Amino acid sequence: MNADLVALCVWVVVASIIGFLPSRYHWRGAAALVLAGIPVLGWVTWEHGPVYGVAAFVAGTSILRWPVLRLLRWLRRVLEGKGNRDGTA
């Protein structure tokens, strides 16, 4: 197995372990997973092409669904011009 796919599997295992931790660690763990997952996703895409890259992206998105949903809600709010919660743009 290639090193990039091993790194992807390790990322998935770490994500599962973070999921078993108490909820106070979930958001910090999600941030760490996103920071670690972006280079792994690029590496998988570079080595195996866009089909594997999209599959890895879908797998990561299914694991990190709440941070992704919050990001999409925030982007929609910004694009609609409603600004941040504190009333600024």
Image (cartoon, grey):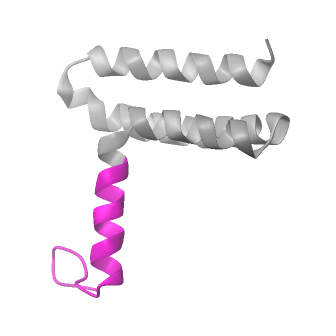
Q: Based on the picture, tell me whether residue 76 belongs to the magenta stretch.
A: yes
Residue at image point 25% right, 82% down: 83
Above or below, comparing residue 43 to residue 19 in the picture: below
Q: Residue at x 81, y 34 (%)?
A: 48
- State which region is magenta: 68-89
Q: Nearer the viewer, residue 18 or 69?
A: 69
Q: Where 33 sits versus 12, above or below? A: below
Which quarter of the figure is the C terminus placed in?
A: bottom left
Q: Which residue corresponds to the image point at 61% horizontal and 36% vertical from the top-left?
A: 55
Which quadrant of the structure image shows residue 72?
A: bottom left
Name which residue lies at 28% across and 64% down. 73
Q: Position of residue 23 (x, y in %)?
A: 19, 27
Instruction: Classify residue 71 as left or right of residue 21.
Output: right
Q: Quadrant of residue 47?
A: top right
Asked where in the image residue 18 lies, by quadrant, the reply is top left
Toward the front, the furthest residue is 51
Residue 57, how many percent across, how many down? 56, 41
Quarter the N terminus occupies: top right
Q: Is residue 18 left or right of residue 57?
A: left
Residue 65 at x, y percent in the picture? 34, 41
Q: Nearer the viewer, residue 9 or 83?
A: 9
Task: Please tell me how many numbered marks the rendered image carries.
Answer: 0
Decide if residue 68 is on the left or right side of residue 13.
Answer: left
Position of 4 relative to 48 (above/below) = above
